[in-house]
Image (tube, rainbow, N blue to C red):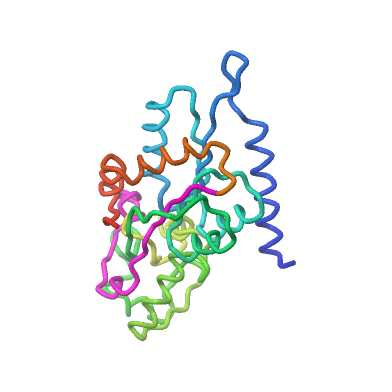
């Protein structure tokens, strides 16, 4: 067993224990809890939508677990109690479909593209994707198994520019964190992440990003404890209200 796999198994086991011990109780009766596993890039949008869903479903608590899509898919495949899974790519959703861990087909609800994130003032004077290959530049990217990392690899192949990241992170929010904390000159993240960073980062669009548009699918898991509630949450995400929230965050239409 690899160290990474062992770490994921421990994380999944810890999540099971935490969710089991934290079931909210009202008047002596356990409330309905909907557990949503979602890609890290969805944190802002899904946090808002979870609040909307709870307001429309009194007595229901939405528990959100954000991480890299590959880690989330692994956790679900190893028994973590997720009712809904929203991935930043179709590949990791496909893994669960192939393992018969989904209740029906997934629905694509958004798209996203990469953007170069740099610190305010752009001290390294980066203006294009090829600039990221300059010697001595500290560039951070997602690991290849993470959707944003797979997208980065597609852009590299399409452009013929090979990057040498100083680190590869397990989620897009970790990449952005390295940029906003001053540990990197630039990082490859999604357009939505740059927007969410506000004045902590500046986004530099690049034409090659069109070579790697990520589609975001969402589905009810086969082991969902309340599949009807899960479907209602998915309907919120894929409906007009959800699309408005996603569009405001910078996501593209499916």
Magenta-drawn segment: 193-221
Question: Is 6 inside the magenta-drawn segment?
Answer: no
Front in this rendered view, residue 134 or 214: 214
Instruction: Pinpoint residue 251: horizontal percent, then vertical percent.
Output: 30, 54
**Residue 18 lies in quadrant:** top right
Front in this rendered view, residue 40 or 227: 227
**Residue 110 lies in quadrant:** bottom left
Instruction: Pinpoint residue 33: horizontal percent, then vertical percent.
Output: 54, 32
Task: State the residue lying farthest toward the front.
Answer: 104
Front in this rendered view, residue 239 or 181: 239
The count of marks equals: 0
State which quarter of the image contains the C terminus: bottom left
Whether 206 is drawn above or below 19: the answer is below
Q: Residue at x 66, y 35 (%)?
A: 20
Instruction: Pinpoint residue 188: horizontal percent, then vertical percent.
Output: 39, 66
Query: Is 64 positioned to the left or the right of 202 in the image?
Result: right
Q: Which residue is drawn at 50% across and 30% down?
A: 61
Q: Which residue is drawn at 54% across and 61% down?
A: 70
Task: State the residue lying farthest toward the bottom.
Answer: 160
The reply to whether residue 14 is visible in this rendering is yes
**Residue 88 lies in quadrant:** bottom left
Whether 46 is drawn above or below 216: the answer is above
Whether 75 is drawn above or below 81: the answer is below
Whether 94 is drawn above or below 137: the answer is above
Task: State the residue lying farthest toward the top.
Answer: 27
Query: Is 10 positioned to the left or the right of 221 in the image?
Result: right
Instruction: Pinpoint residue 253: horizontal percent, then vertical percent.
Output: 26, 55
State which quarter of the image contains the N terminus: bottom right
The reply to whether residue 167 is visible in this rendering is no
């Amino acid at each position: 067993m690899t160290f990474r796999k062992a770490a994921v198994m421990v994380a999944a086991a810890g999540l099971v224990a935490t969710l089991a011990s934290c079931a909210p109780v009202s008047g002596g009766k356990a409330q309905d809890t909907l557990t949503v596993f979602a890609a890290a890039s969805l944190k802002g949008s899904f946090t808002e939508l979870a609040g909307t869903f709870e307001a429309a479903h009194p007595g229901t608590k939405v528990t959100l677990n954000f991480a890299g899509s590959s880690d989330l898919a692994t956790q679900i495949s190893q028994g973590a109690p997720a009712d809904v899974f929203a991935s930043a790519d179709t590949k990791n959703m496909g893994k669960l479909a192939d393992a018969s861990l989904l209740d029906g087909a997934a629905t694509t609800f958004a798209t996203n593209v990469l953007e170069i994130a740099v610190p305010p003032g752009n001290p390294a004077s980066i203006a294009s994707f090829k600039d990221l290959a300059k010697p001595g530049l500290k560039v951070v990217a997602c690991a290849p198994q993470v959707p944003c990392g797979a997208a980065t690899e597609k852009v590299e192949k399409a452009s013929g520019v090979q990057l040498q990241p100083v680190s590869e992170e397990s989620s897009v929010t970790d990449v952005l964190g390295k940029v906003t904390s001053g540990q990197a000159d630039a990082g490859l993240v999604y357009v939505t992440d740059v927007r969410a960073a506000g004045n902590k980062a500046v986004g530099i669009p690049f034409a090659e990003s069109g070579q790697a548009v990520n589609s975001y699918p969402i589905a009810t898991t086969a082991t969902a404890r309340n599949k009807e509630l899960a479907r209602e949450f998915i309907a919120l995400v894929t409906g007009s209200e959800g699309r408005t929230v996603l569009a405001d965050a910078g996501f593209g239409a499916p």
